[in-house]
Image (tube, rainbow, N blue to C red):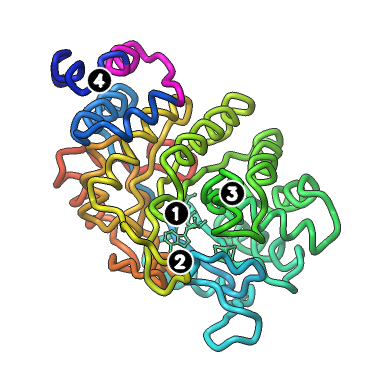
Protein backbone atom coordinates (compact mmCIF):
# COMPACT_ATOMS: atom_id res chain seq x y z
CA UNK A 1 0.00 0.00 0.00
CA UNK A 2 1.58 3.29 -1.14
CA UNK A 3 0.89 6.58 0.57
CA UNK A 4 0.79 9.99 -1.04
CA UNK A 5 4.34 11.39 -0.87
CA UNK A 6 5.89 13.23 2.08
CA UNK A 7 5.52 16.67 0.51
CA UNK A 8 1.80 16.15 0.20
CA UNK A 9 1.51 15.40 3.93
CA UNK A 10 3.91 18.24 4.81
CA UNK A 11 1.64 20.65 2.90
CA UNK A 12 -1.30 19.43 4.99
CA UNK A 13 0.63 19.90 8.25
CA UNK A 14 0.53 16.12 8.75
CA UNK A 15 4.22 15.24 8.20
CA UNK A 16 4.74 14.12 11.82
CA UNK A 17 1.55 12.08 11.84
CA UNK A 18 2.48 10.39 8.55
CA UNK A 19 5.87 9.43 10.03
CA UNK A 20 4.25 8.08 13.20
CA UNK A 21 1.70 6.03 11.28
CA UNK A 22 4.40 4.61 9.04
CA UNK A 23 6.38 3.24 12.00
CA UNK A 24 3.30 2.31 14.07
CA UNK A 25 3.81 4.96 16.78
CA UNK A 26 0.80 5.89 18.93
CA UNK A 27 -1.05 9.10 17.97
CA UNK A 28 -1.74 11.77 20.60
CA UNK A 29 -4.92 13.73 21.38
CA UNK A 30 -3.50 16.68 19.39
CA UNK A 31 -2.77 14.41 16.42
CA UNK A 32 -6.40 13.28 16.44
CA UNK A 33 -7.63 16.88 16.39
CA UNK A 34 -5.26 17.71 13.51
CA UNK A 35 -6.67 14.78 11.51
CA UNK A 36 -10.21 16.13 11.97
CA UNK A 37 -9.05 19.62 10.97
CA UNK A 38 -7.06 18.54 7.90
CA UNK A 39 -8.76 20.00 4.80
CA UNK A 40 -8.22 16.85 2.75
CA UNK A 41 -10.17 13.75 3.90
CA UNK A 42 -8.42 11.58 1.29
CA UNK A 43 -5.07 12.20 3.00
CA UNK A 44 -6.54 10.94 6.28
CA UNK A 45 -8.21 8.02 4.52
CA UNK A 46 -4.94 6.92 2.87
CA UNK A 47 -3.21 6.77 6.26
CA UNK A 48 -6.04 4.66 7.71
CA UNK A 49 -6.03 2.39 4.65
CA UNK A 50 -2.31 1.80 5.14
CA UNK A 51 -2.92 0.67 8.73
CA UNK A 52 -5.90 -1.49 7.75
CA UNK A 53 -3.83 -3.11 4.97
CA UNK A 54 -0.91 -3.73 7.34
CA UNK A 55 -3.29 -5.51 9.75
CA UNK A 56 -5.58 -7.40 7.38
CA UNK A 57 -4.29 -7.12 3.79
CA UNK A 58 -7.23 -6.86 1.42
CA UNK A 59 -9.48 -9.11 3.55
CA UNK A 60 -12.94 -7.89 4.49
CA UNK A 61 -14.68 -10.02 7.10
CA UNK A 62 -18.35 -10.92 7.29
CA UNK A 63 -20.44 -13.21 9.47
CA UNK A 64 -23.67 -15.17 9.09
CA UNK A 65 -25.46 -13.60 12.02
CA UNK A 66 -28.87 -12.61 13.30
CA UNK A 67 -30.02 -9.61 15.33
CA UNK A 68 -32.93 -10.02 17.73
CA UNK A 69 -34.46 -7.13 19.70
CA UNK A 70 -36.42 -8.50 22.66
CA UNK A 71 -38.16 -5.24 23.63
CA UNK A 72 -38.31 -1.57 22.68
CA UNK A 73 -39.71 -0.59 26.09
CA UNK A 74 -37.04 1.43 27.86
CA UNK A 75 -36.86 3.57 30.99
CA UNK A 76 -33.92 5.64 29.75
CA UNK A 77 -35.52 7.83 27.08
CA UNK A 78 -32.28 8.89 25.38
CA UNK A 79 -32.92 12.08 23.40
CA UNK A 80 -31.47 10.71 20.14
CA UNK A 81 -33.32 7.37 20.20
CA UNK A 82 -36.15 6.67 17.73
CA UNK A 83 -36.55 3.06 18.86
CA UNK A 84 -37.67 3.46 22.48
CA UNK A 85 -41.27 3.32 23.74
CA UNK A 86 -42.74 3.84 27.20
CA UNK A 87 -44.36 0.88 28.94
CA UNK A 88 -47.96 0.65 27.66
CA UNK A 89 -47.31 3.02 24.75
CA UNK A 90 -48.64 2.07 21.33
CA UNK A 91 -45.98 0.22 19.34
CA UNK A 92 -44.22 -1.11 22.43
CA UNK A 93 -43.38 -4.84 22.35
CA UNK A 94 -41.79 -7.54 24.47
CA UNK A 95 -40.85 -10.92 22.95
CA UNK A 96 -41.32 -14.12 24.91
CA UNK A 97 -38.57 -16.74 25.00
CA UNK A 98 -40.66 -18.71 22.47
CA UNK A 99 -40.86 -15.68 20.15
CA UNK A 100 -37.06 -15.32 20.24
CA UNK A 101 -36.53 -19.01 19.47
CA UNK A 102 -39.12 -18.89 16.66
CA UNK A 103 -37.24 -15.98 15.04
CA UNK A 104 -33.97 -17.92 15.17
CA UNK A 105 -35.61 -21.11 13.84
CA UNK A 106 -37.17 -19.25 10.93
CA UNK A 107 -33.94 -17.63 9.66
CA UNK A 108 -32.85 -18.83 6.22
CA UNK A 109 -29.29 -19.58 7.43
CA UNK A 110 -28.13 -21.03 10.76
CA UNK A 111 -26.37 -18.11 12.44
CA UNK A 112 -22.81 -18.35 13.78
CA UNK A 113 -23.39 -15.21 15.87
CA UNK A 114 -26.58 -14.01 17.54
CA UNK A 115 -26.79 -10.37 18.63
CA UNK A 116 -29.55 -9.77 21.20
CA UNK A 117 -30.21 -6.31 22.64
CA UNK A 118 -33.21 -4.35 23.84
CA UNK A 119 -34.40 -1.39 25.82
CA UNK A 120 -34.00 -1.21 29.61
CA UNK A 121 -37.39 -2.73 30.47
CA UNK A 122 -38.68 -1.95 33.97
CA UNK A 123 -39.89 -5.49 34.73
CA UNK A 124 -37.90 -8.15 32.81
CA UNK A 125 -35.84 -10.04 35.37
CA UNK A 126 -32.55 -11.84 34.92
CA UNK A 127 -34.09 -15.34 34.73
CA UNK A 128 -35.90 -14.29 31.51
CA UNK A 129 -32.51 -13.58 29.90
CA UNK A 130 -30.89 -16.71 31.36
CA UNK A 131 -33.76 -18.82 29.96
CA UNK A 132 -33.31 -17.32 26.48
CA UNK A 133 -29.54 -17.90 26.44
CA UNK A 134 -29.88 -21.46 27.76
CA UNK A 135 -32.55 -22.30 25.18
CA UNK A 136 -30.46 -20.97 22.28
CA UNK A 137 -27.27 -22.73 23.38
CA UNK A 138 -29.21 -25.99 23.74
CA UNK A 139 -30.26 -25.75 20.07
CA UNK A 140 -27.08 -24.18 18.69
CA UNK A 141 -24.15 -25.11 20.97
CA UNK A 142 -21.56 -23.61 18.59
CA UNK A 143 -23.17 -20.19 18.17
CA UNK A 144 -21.45 -17.10 19.62
CA UNK A 145 -23.96 -15.26 21.82
CA UNK A 146 -23.19 -11.53 21.68
CA UNK A 147 -25.90 -10.11 23.89
CA UNK A 148 -26.81 -7.13 26.11
CA UNK A 149 -24.99 -3.82 26.13
CA UNK A 150 -23.15 -2.65 29.26
CA UNK A 151 -26.14 -0.34 29.83
CA UNK A 152 -28.51 -3.33 29.93
CA UNK A 153 -26.13 -5.25 32.24
CA UNK A 154 -26.10 -2.26 34.66
CA UNK A 155 -29.91 -2.07 34.42
CA UNK A 156 -30.33 -5.80 35.21
CA UNK A 157 -28.02 -5.36 38.23
CA UNK A 158 -30.11 -2.47 39.51
CA UNK A 159 -33.41 -4.36 39.06
CA UNK A 160 -32.06 -7.46 40.84
CA UNK A 161 -30.15 -5.47 43.45
CA UNK A 162 -26.96 -7.41 42.71
CA UNK A 163 -23.56 -6.38 41.28
CA UNK A 164 -22.83 -6.15 37.56
CA UNK A 165 -20.14 -8.77 38.20
CA UNK A 166 -22.81 -11.20 39.43
CA UNK A 167 -25.05 -10.42 36.44
CA UNK A 168 -22.18 -11.12 34.02
CA UNK A 169 -21.23 -14.32 35.85
CA UNK A 170 -24.81 -15.65 35.76
CA UNK A 171 -25.25 -14.76 32.09
CA UNK A 172 -21.89 -16.33 31.21
CA UNK A 173 -23.01 -19.53 32.93
CA UNK A 174 -26.19 -19.42 30.81
CA UNK A 175 -24.12 -19.19 27.58
CA UNK A 176 -23.15 -15.53 27.06
CA UNK A 177 -19.91 -15.21 25.05
CA UNK A 178 -19.61 -11.52 24.21
CA UNK A 179 -21.09 -8.09 24.88
CA UNK A 180 -21.98 -5.93 21.88
CA UNK A 181 -20.57 -2.42 21.76
CA UNK A 182 -23.74 -0.35 22.13
CA UNK A 183 -24.52 2.20 24.81
CA UNK A 184 -21.11 3.90 24.70
CA UNK A 185 -22.56 6.84 22.70
CA UNK A 186 -20.11 9.61 23.60
CA UNK A 187 -18.24 9.54 26.92
CA UNK A 188 -17.64 13.30 27.50
CA UNK A 189 -19.88 14.01 30.54
CA UNK A 190 -21.43 17.32 29.45
CA UNK A 191 -22.44 15.99 26.04
CA UNK A 192 -23.56 12.63 27.46
CA UNK A 193 -25.75 14.46 29.99
CA UNK A 194 -27.53 16.25 27.13
CA UNK A 195 -28.18 13.23 24.88
CA UNK A 196 -28.70 10.38 27.37
CA UNK A 197 -28.95 11.74 30.92
CA UNK A 198 -30.45 8.57 32.44
CA UNK A 199 -28.01 6.13 30.85
CA UNK A 200 -24.98 4.59 32.66
CA UNK A 201 -22.09 7.04 32.84
CA UNK A 202 -18.92 6.54 30.80
CA UNK A 203 -17.17 5.24 33.93
CA UNK A 204 -19.91 2.66 34.50
CA UNK A 205 -19.92 1.58 30.83
CA UNK A 206 -16.14 1.10 30.85
CA UNK A 207 -16.23 -0.72 34.21
CA UNK A 208 -18.77 -3.28 32.93
CA UNK A 209 -16.64 -3.96 29.84
CA UNK A 210 -13.51 -4.35 31.93
CA UNK A 211 -15.35 -6.71 34.31
CA UNK A 212 -16.47 -8.73 31.30
CA UNK A 213 -12.88 -8.89 30.00
CA UNK A 214 -11.65 -10.08 33.41
CA UNK A 215 -14.25 -12.88 33.25
CA UNK A 216 -12.89 -13.95 29.84
CA UNK A 217 -15.75 -12.48 27.81
CA UNK A 218 -14.90 -10.57 24.63
CA UNK A 219 -16.67 -7.28 23.91
CA UNK A 220 -17.12 -4.72 21.15
CA UNK A 221 -17.25 -0.94 21.48
CA UNK A 222 -18.97 1.90 19.63
CA UNK A 223 -19.12 5.67 19.27
CA UNK A 224 -22.25 7.56 18.23
CA UNK A 225 -21.14 10.64 16.29
CA UNK A 226 -22.62 13.42 14.19
CA UNK A 227 -25.02 14.83 16.78
CA UNK A 228 -24.02 17.60 19.20
CA UNK A 229 -20.57 16.29 20.12
CA UNK A 230 -17.37 18.22 19.42
CA UNK A 231 -14.27 16.91 17.69
CA UNK A 232 -12.58 16.98 21.09
CA UNK A 233 -15.36 14.74 22.48
CA UNK A 234 -14.72 12.23 19.69
CA UNK A 235 -10.98 12.04 20.29
CA UNK A 236 -11.50 11.86 24.06
CA UNK A 237 -13.89 8.93 23.47
CA UNK A 238 -11.43 7.05 21.27
CA UNK A 239 -8.58 7.60 23.72
CA UNK A 240 -10.69 6.37 26.65
CA UNK A 241 -11.43 3.18 24.68
CA UNK A 242 -7.74 2.80 23.81
CA UNK A 243 -6.76 3.16 27.48
CA UNK A 244 -9.44 0.68 28.52
CA UNK A 245 -8.05 -1.79 25.97
CA UNK A 246 -4.54 -1.27 27.39
CA UNK A 247 -5.90 -2.32 30.80
CA UNK A 248 -7.79 -5.48 29.72
CA UNK A 249 -7.39 -6.30 26.06
CA UNK A 250 -10.86 -7.78 25.51
CA UNK A 251 -12.23 -5.46 22.82
CA UNK A 252 -12.47 -7.20 19.45
CA UNK A 253 -14.08 -4.62 17.21
CA UNK A 254 -14.99 -0.92 17.17
CA UNK A 255 -18.17 0.22 15.43
CA UNK A 256 -18.42 3.92 14.50
CA UNK A 257 -22.15 4.78 14.34
CA UNK A 258 -23.18 7.89 12.40
CA UNK A 259 -26.26 9.49 13.97
CA UNK A 260 -29.44 8.89 11.92
CA UNK A 261 -31.76 11.80 12.40
CA UNK A 262 -35.32 10.64 11.70
CA UNK A 263 -37.93 10.37 14.50
CA UNK A 264 -35.50 11.86 17.01
CA UNK A 265 -36.04 14.62 19.54
CA UNK A 266 -32.58 15.88 18.69
CA UNK A 267 -32.40 18.54 15.97
CA UNK A 268 -29.10 18.72 14.14
CA UNK A 269 -27.96 21.88 12.39
CA UNK A 270 -25.18 20.38 10.29
CA UNK A 271 -25.88 16.75 9.45
CA UNK A 272 -22.88 14.60 8.53
CA UNK A 273 -21.75 14.43 4.92
CA UNK A 274 -20.57 11.13 3.46
CA UNK A 275 -16.97 12.34 3.68
CA UNK A 276 -17.45 13.34 7.35
CA UNK A 277 -18.47 9.77 8.08
CA UNK A 278 -15.52 8.30 6.20
CA UNK A 279 -13.08 10.64 7.92
CA UNK A 280 -14.41 9.65 11.37
CA UNK A 281 -14.06 5.96 10.47
CA UNK A 282 -10.49 6.56 9.24
CA UNK A 283 -9.52 8.47 12.40
CA UNK A 284 -10.97 5.67 14.53
CA UNK A 285 -8.65 3.20 12.75
CA UNK A 286 -5.69 5.51 13.32
CA UNK A 287 -6.35 6.28 17.01
CA UNK A 288 -7.40 2.75 18.09
CA UNK A 289 -4.03 1.13 17.50
CA UNK A 290 -4.82 -1.70 19.93
CA UNK A 291 -8.29 -2.76 18.72
CA UNK A 292 -7.96 -5.26 15.89
CA UNK A 293 -11.12 -4.63 13.86
CA UNK A 294 -13.17 -1.64 12.67
CA UNK A 295 -16.70 -2.42 11.49
CA UNK A 296 -18.38 -0.80 8.50
CA UNK A 297 -21.90 -1.46 9.80
CA UNK A 298 -23.83 -1.46 6.52
CA UNK A 299 -27.19 -1.11 8.29
CA UNK A 300 -26.42 2.39 9.60
CA UNK A 301 -23.96 3.51 6.91
CA UNK A 302 -25.89 2.18 3.92
CA UNK A 303 -24.30 -0.50 1.78
CA UNK A 304 -22.46 1.80 -0.66
CA UNK A 305 -20.96 3.92 2.11
CA UNK A 306 -19.95 0.73 3.96
CA UNK A 307 -18.11 -0.36 0.80
CA UNK A 308 -16.27 2.98 0.71
CA UNK A 309 -15.45 2.58 4.43
CA UNK A 310 -13.47 -0.60 3.57
CA UNK A 311 -11.02 1.80 1.86
CA UNK A 312 -11.02 4.22 4.81
CA UNK A 313 -9.78 1.93 7.58
CA UNK A 314 -12.64 -0.54 8.12
CA UNK A 315 -12.14 -4.28 7.63
CA UNK A 316 -15.43 -5.87 8.75
CA UNK A 317 -18.75 -5.72 6.93
CA UNK A 318 -20.82 -7.19 9.81
CA UNK A 319 -23.28 -9.76 8.55
CA UNK A 320 -26.57 -11.09 7.30
CA UNK A 321 -28.40 -9.43 10.28
CA UNK A 322 -31.88 -10.72 9.15
CA UNK A 323 -33.96 -8.08 10.99
CA UNK A 324 -32.94 -4.67 12.38
CA UNK A 325 -35.04 -2.13 14.23
CA UNK A 326 -32.82 0.49 15.96
CA UNK A 327 -31.39 2.06 12.81
CA UNK A 328 -34.52 1.55 10.70
CA UNK A 329 -36.73 3.39 13.21
CA UNK A 330 -34.26 6.28 12.84
CA UNK A 331 -34.41 6.38 9.03
CA UNK A 332 -31.87 3.77 7.86
CA UNK A 333 -32.69 3.02 4.21
CA UNK A 334 -30.71 -0.22 4.01
CA UNK A 335 -32.42 -3.61 3.65
CA UNK A 336 -33.40 -5.53 6.78
CA UNK A 337 -30.92 -8.28 6.01
CA UNK A 338 -28.47 -9.48 3.35
CA UNK A 339 -27.76 -12.94 1.96
CA UNK A 340 -24.29 -14.45 2.07
CA UNK A 341 -23.86 -13.93 -1.66
CA UNK A 342 -25.00 -10.29 -1.47
CA UNK A 343 -22.39 -9.69 1.23
CA UNK A 344 -19.58 -11.36 -0.71
CA UNK A 345 -20.52 -9.54 -3.92
CA UNK A 346 -20.55 -6.17 -2.13
CA UNK A 347 -17.11 -6.91 -0.67
CA UNK A 348 -15.65 -8.13 -3.97
CA UNK A 349 -17.20 -5.13 -5.73
CA UNK A 350 -14.82 -2.79 -3.95
CA UNK A 351 -11.73 -4.88 -4.55
CA UNK A 352 -11.52 -6.69 -1.20
CA UNK A 353 -11.43 -10.43 -0.53
CA UNK A 354 -14.44 -11.65 1.45
CA UNK A 355 -13.54 -13.80 4.47
CA UNK A 356 -16.28 -15.49 6.46
CA UNK A 357 -15.70 -15.34 10.23
CA UNK A 358 -17.39 -16.47 13.43
CA UNK A 359 -18.43 -14.11 16.22
CA UNK A 360 -14.87 -14.05 17.64
CA UNK A 361 -13.36 -13.20 14.23
CA UNK A 362 -11.96 -16.70 13.73
CA UNK A 363 -11.75 -17.30 9.98
CA UNK A 364 -13.94 -20.11 8.67
O1 LIG B 1 -26.14 1.99 21.42
C1 LIG B 1 -29.36 4.50 18.58
C2 LIG B 1 -27.04 3.50 18.35
C3 LIG B 1 -26.54 1.45 19.08
C4 LIG B 1 -29.36 5.74 16.81
O2 LIG B 1 -21.29 -4.80 18.83
C5 LIG B 1 -28.17 5.02 16.83
O3 LIG B 1 -21.16 -5.82 16.92
C6 LIG B 1 -27.51 6.01 14.87
O4 LIG B 1 -24.35 -0.88 19.14
N1 LIG B 1 -28.62 6.73 14.81
C7 LIG B 1 -26.92 0.00 18.96
N2 LIG B 1 -27.24 5.15 15.87
C8 LIG B 1 -26.23 -0.64 17.76
C9 LIG B 1 -24.92 -1.24 18.15
C10 LIG B 1 -24.31 -2.30 17.32
C11 LIG B 1 -24.76 -2.53 16.04
C12 LIG B 1 -24.17 -3.53 15.30
C13 LIG B 1 -23.16 -4.31 15.79
C14 LIG B 1 -22.72 -4.09 17.09
C15 LIG B 1 -21.66 -4.95 17.66
C16 LIG B 1 -23.28 -3.06 17.86
O5 LIG B 1 -27.19 2.15 18.05
C17 LIG B 1 -26.94 2.21 20.31
C18 LIG B 1 -26.78 3.63 19.83
O6 LIG B 1 -25.45 4.04 19.97
N3 LIG B 1 -28.20 4.29 17.95
N4 LIG B 1 -30.09 5.40 17.89
C19 LIG B 1 -29.59 6.64 15.74
N5 LIG B 1 -30.67 7.40 15.67
FE1 LIG C 1 -33.21 2.97 25.70
FE2 LIG C 1 -31.06 2.31 24.25
FE3 LIG C 1 -32.95 3.91 23.19
FE4 LIG C 1 -31.39 4.83 25.15
S1 LIG C 1 -30.67 4.20 23.09
S2 LIG C 1 -33.63 5.03 25.01
S3 LIG C 1 -31.07 3.00 26.41
S4 LIG C 1 -33.22 1.78 23.80
* First in sequence: mark 3 vs mark 1: 3
Q: Nearer the viewer, residue 69 or 281?
A: 281
The residue that appears at 30% across and 62% down in the rendered structure is 338
Q: Image point 25% across, 15% down: which residue?
A: 15
Mark 2 vs 3, N-terminal side: 3
Q: What distance separates the C-alpha of mark 3 from that of mark 1?
A: 11 Å
The answer to whether marks 2 and 1 mark residues whose Cβ atoms lie closer than 8 Å is yes
The magenta segment is 17-29
| Quarter of the rendering containing residue 243 | top right
Q: Residue at x 71, y 38 (%)?
A: 211
Q: Residue at x 35, y 34 (%)?
A: 283
Question: Which mark, residue 266?
Answer: 2
Residue annotated with mark 3:
190
Quadrant containing the C terminus is: top left
Q: Nearer the viewer, residue 61 or 253?
A: 253
Mark nearer the N terminus (3 vs 4) = 4
**Quick check: 350 above or below 297?**
above
Q: Is mark 2 within 8 Å of ligand 1?
A: no
Q: Which residue is mark 1?
A: 228
Whether label 4 lies within 8 Å of ligand 1 gets the answer no
Structural distance between the alpha carbons of marks 2 and 4: 35 Å
Amino acid sequence: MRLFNSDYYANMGLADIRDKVEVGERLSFEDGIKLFECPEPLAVGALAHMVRTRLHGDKAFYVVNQHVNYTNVCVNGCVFCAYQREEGQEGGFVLSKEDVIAKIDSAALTPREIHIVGGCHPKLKLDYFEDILNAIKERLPEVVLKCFTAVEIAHFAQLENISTHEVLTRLKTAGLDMLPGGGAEIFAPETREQICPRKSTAKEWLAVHEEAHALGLKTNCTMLFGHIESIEDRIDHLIQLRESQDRGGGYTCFIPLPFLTENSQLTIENPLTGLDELRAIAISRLMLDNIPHIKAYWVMLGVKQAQAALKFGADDFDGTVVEEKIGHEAGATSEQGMTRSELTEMIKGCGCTPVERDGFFNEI
